[in-house]
Each structure stands twice: as C-alpha cells, then as structure tokens.
Amino acid sequence: MVVVPDLPNLPPLAQWYRDDKLLTPSNLLEMSVGGGGARLTLPHLAKDDEGLYTLRIFTKDGTAEHSSYLFVSDAAPSVAGAPGAPMSVKAYDVNADYVLVSWKPPNTVNEAAITGYFVDRCEAGSDTWVQCNDAPVKVCKYPVHGLKEGRSYHFRVRAVNKAGISRASRKSDKVTALDAAESERLQVIQIEGKYDVVIKDDDLEGYVTIPGEPTDVHASEILKSYVVLSWKPPSPRGRAPLCYVIEKCLAGTGAWQRINTAVTLHSPRYPVFDLQDGQKYQFRVFSVNSHGSSEASAPSEPVQKVDEDGTELPVGVPSAPGQVVATRNTKSSVFVQWQPPKTLKNLVGYYIDGRVVGSKDWFPCNHKPFKHSRFVVHGLIPGETYTFRVQAVNVFGLSDESQESSPIAVQPALGKGVEYATPSAPFGITMLSCDGSSMTLAWRRPKHCGGSRINAYYIDKRNADTLTWKEVNLSAVTERICTVDNLTEGIFYEFKIQAANMAGVGVPSDPSAPIKCEAWTMEEPGPAYDLSFSEVRGQSLVLLWKAPVYTGAAAVSGYLVDMAKKDSSEFVTLTQEAVSQRYLKVTTLEEGETYVFRVRAVSAKGVGKPSRLSEPVCAKALPGTQEIVAGVDEVTGDVFLSLEACEISEMSTFVWSKNYKAIGDCPRVAATAKGRTSRLTFTNPDKADLGRYSVAVTDTDGVSASHTLTEDALNTMLELSYAIRNPIVPLKHGLNYEILEKGHVRFWVQAVKLSPSVSYRFIVNDKEVKTGEGIKISHDVASGVIQMTVDLFTRANEGTYTVQIHDGKAKTQSSLVLVGDVFKVALKEADFQRKEHIRKQGPHFSEYLYFTVTEDCTVMLACKVANVKKDTSFHWFKEDDEIVPETPPNVVSGACALPIHLFSRKDQGVFKAVLGDDRGKDTSLFDISGKVFDDIINALAHNAGASASELVLQCTPEGIRLQCYMNYYTEEMKTVWKHKESKIASSEKMRIGGTAEMAWMQICDPSDKEKGSYSIEISDGVQTYARTFDLSGQAYTDAYEEYLRLKAAAFAEKNRGRVLGGLADVVTIMEDKSLSLTCTVWGQPTPEVSWFKNEQEVASNEHTRVTFEGGKFSSLVINKVTPEDSGKYSINVRNKYGGEFVELTVSVYRLGEKLPEPKLGQPKMATATPTTTAAPPKTPATPSKTPTPASTQVPKSPTLTPKSPPPKSPTPTPSRGVKSPTPPRFMKSPTPPRK
C-alpha cells in the first residue's frame, strides 16, 4: 500500500504514526520525503498493518496532521471454512531455553468457532518451521521451551477449527534465547569517570562448588492447558553450568516425583502440561551442576488448573458489548457506536461485523481488534440496509456477539445530494475549575450542526510538550461541559473537541491554548460560562448565562454584567447591584452597534473571575421579526401563546421557557409546532401560570421573542375560553357515589342544565348497563341530576364507572374509578348500611353510648333508642356485672342515662347497654379508659375550673392551708399549685390534697420562706383556670399568729383530762342491788377525778365508795341501793389543760314496780343487771352546760376568711357536758363556709 497525501510546500520533517504509535523504517515499513510529498510504503502487507495512520508535519508555523484508516482483509483461506490468520505475534519473558508467545485471535464471522492454535518456530536464517505444541492450545499465549541458548528464533501462529487450519500469521520479530539472569550478575564500576570495570558475581562469591537452592517457586501462568512455573535462580550459584530439576506432588501428600526427566532445564521457567483436572499440586526445584545438587527449594503454594470461565483466577473471555447504535454518515459509510462490556477482563479490542438485512451471511468490518467503542464502517452499498453487531476480544478469545443494531439504510444524513453532514468544529474551549488532578472544561456549540441535531461530543487531550493525542471519553458527552480526570499537577495540557450528530463525528476544533493544571484555591467564585443572547432588537436584548462550576469559599449571591462595544476595552457595568437571576434584559442600546459582554459572579468573599467574552452581537432585529401573541382557540377554547418565526430550518425546534428557564415536560402547558408557528397551550390556566414566557428557535440566526402574561390578560382570556367551550355540557358535579340506607349505592352526576331531549348511558367496566333487576337508572331535568342505583353492591361491582351525556350538540362524560382501597371503603359502608337497616327493624340505639357532664359534675352515660315499646327491656352493665340504677330506665322516652357520681379512676372499665324485646336485641359498648377517660376528666376539670372559688386561707394546728372550692374535685384532674411561679410538689413541708368539694395545699410548720404569692391552675386540656392568693404582709402575720394559737389549743385538747368511755346515759337498777359506775379516764398530766350526785360531791363512806386506780380507772360503787340513791350523777375529770364533765341518771325501783320511763330527750336504756357495770354508749354525747365554776370559755373559730354565711349545722344530740378549754363536741371540724 502507498499513501501519498497531497501536500504542497512539504515541510522538512514528517512523522508517521499507526494508532498513535510512532513508526520507524524497517523491512516492513519504507518511508520517504521529497518532491513535495511524503510516502509510506508497506511492502509485505498483513492484517497487522490495519489501523489509523496519521502523518504529522512540522513546520516553523506549527504542526499539521492528516489521518486515514487502512483496512486489510484476510487472504483467501487455504481450506474452505478455515479461520483467518492470527496476528500481532509477540515473544516475551525470554530465557535461555524458554519464551512465552502471545497473539491476537482473528475475527470469525461465518466460519466455525476456533478450537485452538498451533505455534511454530524457526531459527533465524532458516526457512524450516517446527511445530511447538502437539495439541492445539485454546488461549492466545503459549510457553515454548527446549530452545538452544544463544540462538535466535522467529515464531508464527496458525488457528484451527473443525474445517481446517488457517494460513500462518506474520512471523514475530527475532528474539534470542539468553539467560535473563546473567546480566543481573554483572556489576559495572567507573574509575575516574573514564574507565568501566565489569565484575561478575562469580568473582565476588569466591570458589563455590554446589549451588544454593532456588527461591520463590510459584505459578506465573495458570490456565486450563498448562501451568508455567517460575522461580528465582540460586545465590550463590557457582561458576559451573547450572540446570534445574523439578518435582511435584499432590498438595499435602509429600509424595514427590520428578517431572522433567527427559529435559535439561537451564531457565527458571518451565511449562507443565500433564496436570489432572480438579487436583491441587505443589512444586519444588533443585539447582544442579557438575559438583552436585542443592537442597530442595521451599514448596510452592498449592496450584490447581482453571478453565476459561475462571474458578480461581479472573480469567475468561469478556462479556458481550452493550447496545449497538448505527447512524447515517455518508452515502457509503455508517457510524457505529456501542457500550463497552460490563466485564472487560484485559480487553484488547473489538471486532465489528455487518450484514445486509435479509441475508444470513455476516462480513467483517475490521480485521484487527479496534480499541475504541465507536467505528466508521466504509465501503457500503448506497441505498442498501444493514445491521451490525460487535464482539469483544482478549487473550482468551472472542466474547458472545452483542445484540444487533436496528437496521439502517446507507445514505447521506441529509440526503438531497449532500454527502457530508457532520457538524463543524466546536470552539471557545474554557476552563471552569481545576483541583490539581482534574479540569472542568466548557465550549461553545459548532456554528453549523450539519443538518441534524448534535447528540455527542468527544474530547481529546495531550501534554503540551508532546504530539500524541489521547481520548478523554469513550462514551459520548451530551452536554457542553466535561471534567477531565487523571491529570498531573503543574503540567500544561491542550484539548480539542469534536461534535457528532446522526451523520457522524465532525472535524475537531483547533487545539486550545495550553492550560496549566493547577488547583484553584481562591476564595472568590470562578467564571460564569455559556453566554448567549435572546430577543435581540434594535435597542435591547436579553443576555443569559450559566452559574460558575467553582464557587470558592462562599455561595454565589449574584452577578455583575459588563458591556463594551466591539473592539473596545472600556467595559461598563450595567448593574449597580448584583442580580440574583442568571439573565438580564439590556436596554438603551444603539441600533446597529455591535457589543460584547462578560459576567462576573459575586459572593461574600468578593467578585470572581470574569467569564469568557461573549460572541459579538449586533443590536438589530432580524428582518420580519414577530412577537409572541396571546390568544384563545376559537374551536377548543384553549388559552395559548403563539409565535410565527421569521425564519426556520429543517432541524429547527421551538424551545419555550418561563422566566428564562426551559419548561420541558410540564403538565401545565403543552407545546406544539406546525410549520413556522409554535403554540404553547395552557392546560388549566390560573395565577400559577403568570410570568414572562420566551421562545427561541434553534438552528437559526437567533429568532426569539418573549411575552409577559398578566393577571388581567389571563382573566379576559379565561372568560372568552368559557364562552367558547360552553357547548360542552357543563357539570356541577362529576360522577360520584353515595351509600343509601339498606346498603343501596347511588351513582350520580349533576349538570348545570339539561334539556328534555337529553340522552345518556352508564358504562361499567366497558359494558353498557341498563335498567333491570337490581339496577334503576333515571334523571331529573329540573335539577340536572342523572343517577343509577344499585340495590345489591358486592365485590363484583368493583371497576370503572362512566356516564356519557348527549344534549343537543353538546356532550360530555364523567368517570369514577372504584378499585382497590377506594372500592373496599365503599363496599364496607354498603355492607354496614345493609346491616344497619336490618338492625333498625327491631329496638335499636339511634345514638350509641356517649358521655356528658352536668353542672354538678355528675358524669352521665347517655344513649338514644328508637323503635321501642313498653315491654322493651333495658339493662346496664359494667365489666359484665349488671348495674341497677336508682331510677329505672324509661325506654319509651327515647333516651336513657346512667349517672356516675364522684367520678374517679375507680370508674374505669367497659360499660354496656343492652336493649331488647321479642323483635331483637341491640348492644352499645362504651370503654372508659385511655383517651375517653382523659376526655371525661378534662370535661370535669372544665366545669370545676369555671366554678372554682378564689383561694381561701384556713389555719390548722399543723400549718396554714389554702383552699379552693369548686363543684367537684378529684386528684385525676390536671391541677398545679405554684409558689412564686414555681411548681409545688407534694412533700412533708407542702402537702397537697383535696376532697370532693375542694382542693387544698397546706404549708406545714410555716416560716418566712413560705411568704409570697400562691396560685392553683386547673387545666381542661384546652383552657387553664387560675386562682391566686398573696400570702405576705399582714395576711401572713395574722395567719401565722392564728396557726400558733391553734397549735397550742390542739396541744391542750390532746392532753386535757377526759372520759374515754364506760358510762351509760341512764342506769336503772332494783332496790338492794349493788351499783358500780366505772369509767376510763385519761389526761397528761394525770387528772383529778370527782364524782357528784345532784351537783353535790360524793364522799367515800360505807354506803358509797369512790376509787381511782392507776390514774386510768375511776369507780363509784353504791352498796344496796335504795330509792334515795336515785338522782343525777356526774364525774368531773380535770388537769391543768382542762377537763370534762359527764352526767348520767340513776333510777332505783322496788321489786314489782313498773320500770320508770327515761326522761324526755334521753334514750330508753335496758335495765341494769345487779353487780354489773353499765355498758358505755357507742358515741358519747357532749354536755351543753358545765355545773362547775371551773369550766373554761370556748375558743373562737380558727377560720380567717372573708365574710360569708356560716354553714348550717345538724341538730345536736342533747348535751351531756362541756370540754374545757376546747370547743364543744357538737361543733363541726373547723372548715370555713363555701362561697
């Protein structure tokens, strides 16, 4: 092949590259320069020569490149059906008698699969080829051993399939079998920088006879066909020639046997072929020379062969490539792209195959593995339709075929005789950010798209000091921004970019200026980018841009826009303050003048780098420029915005935006285009659609316009839209359903107006339903209601319901979907109403149990009943125990209630009301617990809080008590006592409690620390009721004095003399009997005791004896009573704290006389038994007067309260005596009256 580019003025230096690798002259490559041309000759063409050839020309003005892809087909096979020849045969890991040969597999299209390869060798200068392997090897590498040290060899490979053997590959470069370790045993020492002295390790080791043992025995290649053993030569090794002996054993057995008995091995490599599948082996090596053998090396790790699919090592063919996409390119070529395989496994390239649609035969599109994931297939028949597939290649062979591409006809992308339609070059490459190892680049779109939409960009990079370009992205970049990774900090890089469309990849851009890879660390933001224009008019335009990629140390808060006339360096800042949006309408331009713009981002850290200058723009509207028109469609009534473009191309599209943000797929609007006109239709316009709308026409010279939709304009168009759409039957309500009693379901729709001629039909699950058994369909013209009633609603009724209405020219329909959870709710309600109807045929609850709270804080469980009669029974239960209320329930009244007095936690539980007669029974349950219990307590608290009195101060012997009276109090209420706004917790110092009528807080043993404001807060969950009392100043002083007085009085009351029991009120005894009046007395200190008869003290004598024993028991004994002993007796018990005077009456009667009647006001008592003590009463009464002058005055009431009426006291029992100095017994506990 001869490539002769047309190059006038040939520069003095030309370099040829194949796949970006520099070529040098050889027997396979001839190069010449001269005569105004550069020539590359390939005298022995083979598939190895296929690839992308590039000629780089160096001149004083710079560098130019010209490239062309060379396709090389297989020669005809020696046997029909045999595979093509392998290629790229290389020999490496060269040793004294060993070398490893590798190659690339050929493409198999219609041939049978390759089953293996034969490797041949020949000595340099000879034409005799010797086959190295007896059986075909399945992988694309083979270890050749048995070479002769010092001789040179060539190698070639032949592929084998069931049809035969292929032609031989091109022979490899010459290699010489040498001991690779020999050079490592040489040391070179320079003397005075002039002389080199070479010293061998043998000279340093001294005289060594038996060598050392080898080390690091391991498997360097593990495959199904063979295992290659490798090791390090011994040290010391001696000067005698060295060879190796290898032994193997099954792992863990220790049964060693020699494996290279017939081979003298000189290299530290050896292939082992005869290992059994599934077994693990260990190997060891001995060093041997003329003096003897070394010790055995350490055994290798266990080794097991693996198959091509890989069981222990990651080997095997790659997975199939992904989706294959073919697009038009030229009239004879197609651009093919594909996704790389998910599993690469040391991928070496791809084979691309094609076939004519309708044919079964595939043809190869390339004959040497191609490294990239995009390829241009040339030489196709114009007008023919093709499909393509791809296979991935590695050392183990070819992957499965990918899925076929969609069929594509070969023709120019634009047709109409235009052969090339790729985009022009992008330009304006700009760096947006750099972190020291990557750069983010942006660029401007090509000025010409080539007639189809640009769908991909490809970026190449190179070190500014080199000429080799490297691809950055294998897969397409769809946006005009890309981050290039894996860069070296401090290095200058150049970039070039190509755009692609359906026609293929366009020409590359000019290389960018060298850009240094240096991390950005400034605090200010980076540059904005992608400046563009819209709505260019004579005096205004709209400038748009994108936000910086690099934001610096703070978020971007706005932008400054600068403007200058073209070719002027005097920029004027258009905004006094930074604008937050990324667009700006620029006004006050001079028509016909050309301007350039730049944008600077602003943050809290300052003003950032300016953007790249915009393209120059002339302030002049395009001829025939139209503005956006707002209107209403006369047929549909749709509100729309419309633009008629003054120019358009075949590939133009209309891009609508709101507030200069692309609308895209938005449910609120729909964009359509017809010819040069585009319309943006609002689906359901309202205030959310107000704003500024703009539209730009792509692939034109900037056709664009904008329109602001105001509320007034929208309302006007909505009124017009309604008038246009009026012929549609307007509905007040769409199709809906309701559950009727008996469980019937009514489906209904209501129109605004219906005429008598209206027609309609109901469709359920795509089937029309008509009036029949269980279904009634009707309508009412006056109300506009159309309805369908289903008597028995079951699971079979799940589905979609639709009603279609025709009324004159107008028509409409409405649907209702009753499936899933929605249907389950309806079915459940219908079943409930059906059961309710059955329940209501007998006595039933029209309202189930509920609770109310009366003004006196009685909790009432109430319910309402219906359809009852006189003999209908009603019973109350709690936890299945019947409750019999004081007032029997009256079911005929229609309501029943159960009062719960003094409600508290003990009333929690499940209450049940049962209603029944001969027609049936109904039950209502009410669970008073949890939230229900809390609601009742809150209701009680609401009533109690509203009725709460002001705080009342009450002194007691224990301290000062604050009391709050209310209708009802229970400890379950949310009440809080506070002192100086601090919550009080109940303690020994501050006791909190209450009764059914009041809540109280007692300060025990008060001190000055307890002075201050006190309050009680009663909360009902919504409202808080507070009452306060200021316990300070005179109020505290008076209370404290009263507390001290009551404390002393209580102490005296506790310790005064008193009668504890033993005396009756009346004693009746027969004459001549002995009377013993005995009682128990107490007092601290021990009291004095005196007995009286008719207010005269009784003295001891023979007839009457008075005793006082142990300070506890006092007796009056009368021997042989006579009628004169009748009378009023009394006992006076006293000490220094006071005493008690108790009276009784003794009546003596003669034998045969009638028992005397007790005196008026005294209880009738049983007759005393002789010689027995009269029984004491259960509750001793208190006397109303004191016969002794020593009686003490009754103390004042200990209540310190505002004036209020005194409490009513029950009528006292006739008094028997007076306590002194304590209050009389008949007085109530010192509780103040309620307000």
Image (cartoon, rainbow, N blue to C red):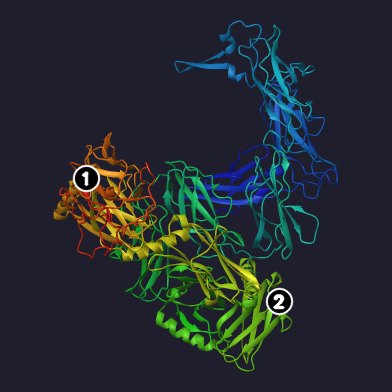
In the rendered image, is residue 42 in sight? no
Q: Position of residue 785 (x, y in %)?
A: 59, 86
Q: Earlier in the sequence, mark 2 or mark 1?
A: 2
For label 1, the crowd category at 10 Å Cα-Cα, with few meaning under 14, some 14 to 19 and many 20 or more, is many
Q: Position of residue 350 (x, y in %)?
A: 68, 47
Give 92 or 528, whichever is nearer the viewer.
528
- Please determine whether, in this image, residue 379 is positioned above or below residue 1104: below
Give 951 or 870, whichever is nearer the viewer.
870
**Kind of element beneath mark 1:** strand
Judge from the rendering whether residue 943 lies leftward or rightward of residue 67; answer left or right: left
Judge from the rendering whether residue 1011 lies leftward or rightward of residue 897; answer left or right: left
- Comparing labels 2 and 1, the label whose residue is closer to the camera: 1
**Kind of element beneath mark 2:** loop
Q: Position of residue 843 (x, y in %)?
A: 61, 74
Cα distance, mark 2 to mark 1?
105 Å
Q: Amino acid at mark 2?
A: Asp
Q: Amino acid at mark 1?
A: Gly
Give 1108 or 69, whichever is nearer the viewer.
1108
Q: Residue 1139 has which mark?
A: 1
Q: Residue furthest left?
A: 1034
In which quadrant of the rendered view does residue 543 lie? bottom left
- Please determine whether, in this image, residue 133 is positioned above or below residue 110: above
Q: Residue furthest bottom?
A: 756
In the rendered image, is residue 253 in sight? yes
Q: Disc 2 marks which residue?
A: 766
Q: Residue at x 16, y 52 (%)?
A: 1193
